[in-house]
Image: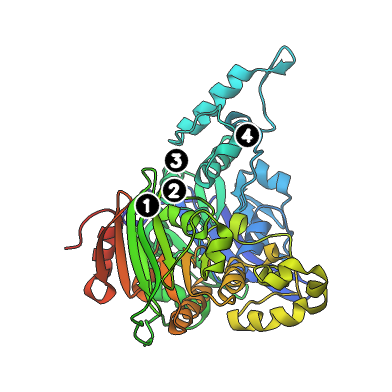
Amino acid sequence: MSPRRTAPAHPAPQALVRVRGVTKSFGGAAALKGVDLDLYPGEIHALMGMNGAGKSTFVHVLSGVHQPDSGTLTLGGHEHTGLTVRRARRLGISSVPQRRELAPGLTVAENVLLGDLPTRYGTVHWKAVREQAGRALSGLGIDIDPDRIAGTLTVAEQTMVEVAREVRRGGRVLILDEPTACLSARDADRVRDLVRTLRDEGVAVVYISHYIDEVMSLADRITVLRDGALVRSAPAAELDAAALVRGMVGRDVVSRRPARPAPRSESGLAVRSLSQGRALRDFSVDVRKGEIVAVLGPAGDGQSRLFDLLSGRQRPDSGEIRVDGRPVPPGRIDASLAGGLRCVTGDRRTLGLVQGLTVDENLMLAGDRFARRRLHRVRHLARRAAPVRDTYGVVALTGNPPVGTLSGGNQQKVLLGKWLETAPVACFLEDPTNGVDVAAMADIHTLVDDLAARGVAVLLASSSPEEVMRLADRVVVVSAGRTVAEHDIDAITRDQLVTTALGGQPQ
């Protein structure tokens, strides 16, 4: 992550967008309460707040999806009481939503020029399509082949292609909603580098993120919303992490390691010489019952394969997995589950939850009786799901909606509740707080603490050094796919941990 900026290199004298006194209500509930905000060219303006703070509503007003009840938006010297999506685009306001919106069957070039394909003699001029798309990508330092099919891109590459498309359309104000959520550390760095390039090209970037460290290192200005109202807007250099948390939550959020019972002597999860190609080679770790062990190393170095191998989605080339002292047959999801191992993916959208099913259906999806007996589900689903909702603090605005309508934090709690209420002996957690706000993060940390206190062996793969310091009893260091060192968490500092994550040796 690059050093924190203190101010834009050349502060602009005039705002591209000036928002004054914007309000918006839905069904009598105030979503925005007189919000003011200025956006300048060549500035990264972070918009922060808890889920439900009004960020999405504000972005929708700015991009023309919603009309404000009152207030004004001034762009290019002209005052507007509301915008349409088409007018916002004409005025240079574009957005890249958290859910990517590429046409997966088309090429990168076709996606970049979608709606504006050059023609010659009445047909599409494909050479010009590739050339113009290549210039749009290379102009932002994006190294992606324009002829690639969009469906083969990583999430980070999809984000980059969408950004190139919006900039080519004339976007001078670009709204990025959680652009690094669910990305590996390496891919997140690529996206952040692109955001810095946009700033240097004079684009006004509205950056929405739950990651406080990321915002503090990237943003030039930070605006905090809480309950629809503007709490504070200031240069990033004038704020610190504690002030941001207080602004978002309205109080201090204490995140200390609680006193947990000492880990038991029995092994809960033992991995011996697990190998798969070059990605993972002779990886070994022992996790005792009641212990939390974190896996750490350079981005993508081995730990990214653990979910597939431990869960049984893929078969390792060699190695052994034991749960509670008993071997688990490799490459079999049913054997992993029967052995008492629960693996919680970091990709809750694609692998973790069924977005079209309801909250209660997702919570009960891992239960044998629910999976096998549909009539049982219809009759008893709500009754069985209610205590799980309470235990994991799942909040839905209306009854039992599709899980895809929940906030990221609540979706993550559903994912954890789905698996961790099935009596695990050991579990593997992959980035359990990815893309959630600080309050949900504190709740999830407490749930993981309680899991270990119940005697479950927990193996944790996290991209957050703070999370590792907060949760883990030990850290296993991975390099070139191998386990190379172990450290008790009390014997290593945060800075040493960051050095380790980058592939160095703690001093």
Whether the residues at callouts 2 and 1 have beta carbons within 8 Å, the answer is yes
Identified by mark 2, the residue type is Asp
Number of numbered labels in the structure image:
4
Towards the viewer: 269 or 78: 269
Task: Identify residue for label 1.
Answer: 299
Q: Whole-Å distance between the Cαs marked 1 and 3?
A: 28 Å
Across and down, in percent, residue 197 comes to 42, 43
Towards the viewer: 360 or 199: 360
Q: Whole-Å distance between the Cαs marked 2 and 4?
A: 21 Å
Circle 1 sits in a helix, a strand or a loop, which is it? loop
Counting other residues with Cα less than 10 Å from the Cα at mark 2, is it few (<14), some (14-19), or many (20 or more)? some
Work out whether 374 lies above or below 204: below
Work out whether 277 lies above or below 134: below
Residue positioned 33% across, 60% down in the render: 284
Specify whether residue 136 is in view: yes
Q: Going from the N terminus, do you reach mark 2 or mark 1 first?
A: 2
Q: Whole-Å distance between the Cαs marked 4 and 1?
A: 29 Å
Identified by mark 4, the residue type is Asn
Of circles 2 and 1, the one toward us is: 1
Of circles 2 and 4, the one toward us is: 2
Q: Whole-Å distance between the Cαs marked 4 and 3?
A: 22 Å
Work out whether 90 lies above or below 19: above
Identified by mark 1, the residue type is Ala
Instruction: Say which mark, if any, is on residue 201.
Output: 3
Residue positioned 56% across, 25% down in the render: 132
Across and down, in percent, residue 91 comes to 64, 44
Work out whether 162 lies above or below 257: above
Q: Going from the N terminus, do you reach mark 1 or mark 3 first?
A: 3
- The image quadrant where one finds the C terminus is bottom left
Counting other residues with Cα less than 10 Å from the Cα at mark 3, is it few (<14), some (14-19), or many (20 or more)? some
Instruction: Say which mark, if any, is on residue 111.
Output: 4
